[in-house]
Image (tube, grey):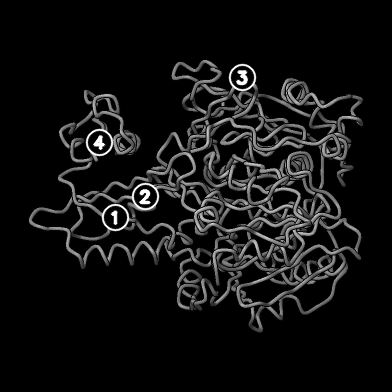
């Protein structure tokens, strides 16, 4: 066991001197490396701070003469009157410099300079325009993490159209639940993918998704004449100027009821946030090679693509993290000269347990970890395996497409502790009465707005669903749904979800998506799904079912449930165990009690886990005691 807070890494004077954040502080006229003072200024003077980000990075666009910030959460509006385009800023690098390296499991390697990437984007942009795509239209993609997804996204953004993507391991129901909400004009997909050495045919899945999309969506299949036709004609680069808060993409984060939430981020908010986060917290810029292991169904794909904004070379990888062996990602990092490598906490834990000693990583300057909390032992293993390479544990969410808390080159790394609250992120820990606490576990909240907060949810015209998602608990304060402890020194410890949203492999999915699949089975009367993950352990995914009268949970039904969840959701959302219980605990108003059951499974006594007086059937709770 490694003690939480044990010192793992300290920055040398050279690291501090050469850090991107040091140059920025000097540009501001601030001397020294007082991170706490810089952070406090960034959250107490948000107009000055975010204006400085625009100016420091020379964002391409027209800032206009409107106010930097109008209103407060949940209706805050940034940079009224400003116009810009994400794709124009992402593609402004030196045309001769490398922009993208794309690798896959089967050994294929493709590269693009910034100039070549811009040329491909212009071709696909012209093809999308021929299909009638224009400003505000949606382009939906069912693609792996390869060049085609990146090119199609940038082409979509360059038109002022709106991008949305799912990974091809998502099942039909998961994709349809997302894409039918946004009525795409074009659907881009692949007919198969390779993972863990196996080829998966998705042609039937793609055909069903396309058939169920509303409206006359054109279907383009990568690797077929329809894709060749889309990119057939050369065209000059062009970028539609759009307002700061114009929709850039739609990502999804599910709750316990209803369809997945279609979260819309704006061009300007993402440009500013990703420039800030990548340069100052990951210390990335020109000459860096940036790789984060992700799929197109996780917000870290969007964050990885943001490396282009910082002028880095980004590495796209399509495949398993552990094929043909557990060191697959470490070997890729060595082969491509990656300078910053990000992955999910479970991969670091798996590397530790496998006793790996990664080699050939002389270019590596930093490692990022996200998706779930990393325990102190993971920090210690990385320090031992890669001495001198700092770990930047990073935590945030799909909702803002960035991290709220992370590392910074000025601060030491301590086991199990995230060094700081990120610049511009007014993070606090709240107790149940809504009071900020220090050195105690509380709800992670933001007390001031950030530009990358959603500009809206799609099809939520009055904003009711958006307000209910983040502001119902503490009016005017964003409640994120994570447990956090803020230490006296400003370090942060994340303890996992404080709500019932499931987090598997970094992909958050709402329990409602499980219930729609499980409760279609005629012999199942009710169900409850619980993710027991906490503090760096992904945990077990447990599905409880109540059977219809006279029915029992059989081995065949368990197999059918697993198959249905694998096919309709994804392989990472197949339960580790399926159990029969006599009843599912509900409130008097009928709401399933997922959070109290999770607490019981993690050791909280029944009488402390739930208010039994507000329950319709408190007697069933005893069936969930481990």
Label 2 near label 1: C-beta < 8 Å? yes
| Residue under pointer 2 | 540
Q: Earlier in the sequence, mark 1 or mark 2?
A: 2
How many numbered dots are placed on residues in this image? 4
Disc 2 to disc 3, C-alpha distance: 33 Å
| Residue under pointer 3 | 488
Name the residue at 59% across, 42% down. Answer: 379
Q: Position of residue 364 (x, y in %)?
A: 75, 54
| Numbered circle sitting on residue 586 | 4
- In screen coordinates, is 113 left or right of 517? right
Disc 1 to disc 2, C-alpha distance: 8 Å
Q: Earlier in the sequence, mark 3 or mark 1?
A: 3
Dot 1: what SS? strand
Front residue of 102/114: it is 102
Which of the two discs, 3 and 1, sits closer to the camera? 3
Q: Position of residue 368 (x, y in %)?
A: 65, 47
Q: Earlier in the sequence, mark 4 or mark 3?
A: 3
Which of the two discs, 4 and 1, sits closer to the camera? 1
Dot 3: what SS? loop
Disc 4 to disc 1, C-alpha distance: 21 Å
Q: Is residue 160 above or below residue 456?
A: below
Q: Earlier in the sequence, mark 2 or mark 4?
A: 2
Answer few, some or many: residues within 10 Å of disc 1's Cα (few below 14, many 20 plus, some between 14 and 19). Answer: few
């Amino acid at each position: 066991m490694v003690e939480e807070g044990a010192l793992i890494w300290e920055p040398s004077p050279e690291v501090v001197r050469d850090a991107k954040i040091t140059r920025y502080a000097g540009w501001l006229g601030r001397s020294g490396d007082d991170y706490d003072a810089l952070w406090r200024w960034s959250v107490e003077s948000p107009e000055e701070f975010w204006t400085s980000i625009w100016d420091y990075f020379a964002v391409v666009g027209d800032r206009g003469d409107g106010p930097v910030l109008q209103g407060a959460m949940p209706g805050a509006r940034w940079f009224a009157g400003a116009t810009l385009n994400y794709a124009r800023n992402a593609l402004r690098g030196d045309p001769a410099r490398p922009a993208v390296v794309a690798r896959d499991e089967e050994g294929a390697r493709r590269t693009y300079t910034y100039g070549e990437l811009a040329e491909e984007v212009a071709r696909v942009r012209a093809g999308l325009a021929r299909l009638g795509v224009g400003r505000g239209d949606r382009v939906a993609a069912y693609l792996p993490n390869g060049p085609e997804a990146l090119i199609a996204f940038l082409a979509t953004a360059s038109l002022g159209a709106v991008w949305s993507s799912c990974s091809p391991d998502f099942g039909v129901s998961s994709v349809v639940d997302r894409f039918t909400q946004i009525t795409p004009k074009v659907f881009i997909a692949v007919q198969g993918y390779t993972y863990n050495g196996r080829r998966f045919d998705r042609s039937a899945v793609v055909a069903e998704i396309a058939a169920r999309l509303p409206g006359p969506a054109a279907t383009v299949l990568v690797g077929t004449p329809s894709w060749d036709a889309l990119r057939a004609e050369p065209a000059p680069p062009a970028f539609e100027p759009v307002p700061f808060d114009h929709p850039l993409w739609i990502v999804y984060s599910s709750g316990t009821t209803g369809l997945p939430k279609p979260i819309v981020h704006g061009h300007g908010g993402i440009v500013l946030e990703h420039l800030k986060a990548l340069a100052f917290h990951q210390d990335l810029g020109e000459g860096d090679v940036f790789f984060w292991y992700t799929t197109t169904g996780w917000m870290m794909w969007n964050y990885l693509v943001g490396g282009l904004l910082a002028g880095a070379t980004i590495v796209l990888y399509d495949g398993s993290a552990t094929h043909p062996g557990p060191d697959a990602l470490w070997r890729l990092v060595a082969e491509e000269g990656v300078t910053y490598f990000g992955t999910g906490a479970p991969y670091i834990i798996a590397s530790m347990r496998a006793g790996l000693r990664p080699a050939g990583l002389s270019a590596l300057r930093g490692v990022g970890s996200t998706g779930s909390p990393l325990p102190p032992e993971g920090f210690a293993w990385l320090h031992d395996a890669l001495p001198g390479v700092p770990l930047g544990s990073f935590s945030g969410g799909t909702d803002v497409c960035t991290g709220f808390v992370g590392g910074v080159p000025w601060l030491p790394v301590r086991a199990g502790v995230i060094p700081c609250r990120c610049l511009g992120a007014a993070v606090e820990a709240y107790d149940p009465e809504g009071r900020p606490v220090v050195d105690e576990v509380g709800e992670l909240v933001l007390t001031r707005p950030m530009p990358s907060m959603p500009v809206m949810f799609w099809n939520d015209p009055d904003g009711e669903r958006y307000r209910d998602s983040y502001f119902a608990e503490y009016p005017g304060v964003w409640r994120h749904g994570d447990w956090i402890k803020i230490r006296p020194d400003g370090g942060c410890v994340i303890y996992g979800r404080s709500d019932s949203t499931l987090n598997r492999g970094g992909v958050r999915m709402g329990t409602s998506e499980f219930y729609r699949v499980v409760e279609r089975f005629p012999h199942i009367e009710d169900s409850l799904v619980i993710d027991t993950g906490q503090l760096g352990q992904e945990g077990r995914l447990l599905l409880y079912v109540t059977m219809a009268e006279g029915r029992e949970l059989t081995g065949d039904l368990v197999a059918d449930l697993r198959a249905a969840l694998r096919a309709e959701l994804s392989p990472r959302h197949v339960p580790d165990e399926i159990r029969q219980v006599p009843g599912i605990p509900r409130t008097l108003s009928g709401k399933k009690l997922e959070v109290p059951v999770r607490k019981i499974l993690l050791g909280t006594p029944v009488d402390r886990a739930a208010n039994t007086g507000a329950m319709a059937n408190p007697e069933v709770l005893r069936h969930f005691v481990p």
